[in-house]
Image (cartoon, rainbow, N blue to C red):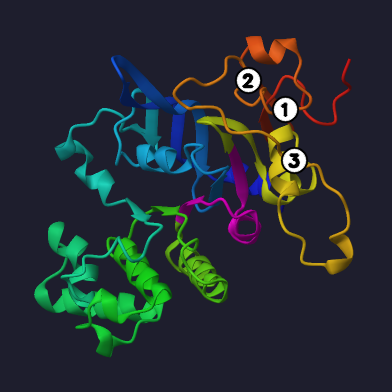
Amino acid sequence: MSLAEVNKERKALLTAEHLYKEFPVEEGKKKEAVHAVTDVNLSLMEGETLALVGESGCGKSTLGKTLIRLYDSDGGKILFDGTDITHMKEREFAPFRTQMQIIFQDPYASLNPRMNVFQIISEPLRTHHRYSKEELSERVYQLMDEVGIAREFANRYPHQFSGGQRQRIGIARALALNPRLIVCDEPVSALDVSIQSQVLNLLKDLQEAYQLTYLFISHDLSVVKFIADRVCVMFLGMICEIGATEELYENPLHPYTRFLLNAIPLADPALRSEKKTLLQGDIPSPVNPPSGCRFHTRCPYAKDICSRETPPCRTCGDRIVYCHFPLGEERS
């Protein structure tokens, strides 16, 4: 069964409709805003791993945090399992809060240095009053077993662990409340390459065991190819393209996607001599983004319409692309 057929049988766990997020900034006497997320439409299917990719500063992490309401949105709608959670009061939102968790990028900064492992993992359970004292201990030890942290280390503090071990502790904390959705915000980018594969395999095993849905944020396309079912490419706060991982890597439809894939280092020495066109120029300012297609100032295929009009949403089979002239189409 293809991924498209699987997704048709799945239901959408999280949906964003015309989502916006801005951060006000003051430049001298002017009041401006960083347009971090602009008119994003996205569906995350139950049980899948959807990767968000793009250059640093494109709005990936902001989108992830806005979707689980760590940031309040400035426009649009967020649906979780069919329920509109966009403007829910905190008391109403509390049951949904336990169903969505986040694994942060920096395992050094995301753990409280004054708390030991047992306290860190049990904190969500104590906050939401889950389990009796005896059940709490058993649950914490069970989570330690599942992420590969020895039980005898329960009284140790974060500074006594390596980066990979700290990230495992963060993963255990995210799993504590049995969430349905986990936002993985560049969870392996701060780790050595030798440790990255171990953590990625752990995330895959836990997804299968707990029937988890992942929103996986990364700038490393090699990591994304390994773990993601679908990929969403972002540029300057807007979506460029969404598609099944294998199809998108083999046949990118948006020029920006092709440039990102061209930048992946080749492991085969025989292929390294092949010349690939790489992206030129600087990323435009998110405070004053270009009109029309935000990528047009760096796109070698841009025409007049690209600077005037925002690209429409085009569907090509199971692919979605926001481009006036998708790759592979005849250009006049």
Q: Quadrant of the C terminus?
A: top right
Q: Earlier in the sequence, mark 2 or mark 1?
A: 2
Residue position for label 1? 299
Disc on res. 41: none
Do the residues under discs 1 and 3 have CB atoms within 8 angstroms?
A: no
Do the residues under discs 2 and 1 have CB atoms within 8 angstroms?
A: yes
The secondary structure type at the circle numbered 3 is helix
Could you tell me which residue is drawn at 56 percent across and 50 percent down? 219
Q: Earlier in the sequence, mark 1 or mark 3?
A: 3
Between residue 266 and residue 169, name the one nearer to us: 266
The secondary structure type at the circle numbered 2 is loop
Q: What amino acid is at disc 2?
A: Cys
Give the Cα separation between the discs numbered 1 and 3.
11 Å
Q: Nearer the viewer, mark 1 or mark 3?
A: 1
Q: State which region is magenta.
A: 213-233
Image location of residue 199, percent across then percent down: 49, 71
Residue position for label 3? 258
Residue position for label 2? 293
Give the Cα separation between the discs numbered 2 and 1.
10 Å
Could you tell me which residue is drawn at 37 percent across and 26 percent down? 22
Image location of residue 309, percent across then percent down: 63, 11
Image location of residue 48, percent across then percent down: 54, 52
Compared with 20, 8 (above or below) is below
Q: What amino acid is at disc 3?
A: Arg
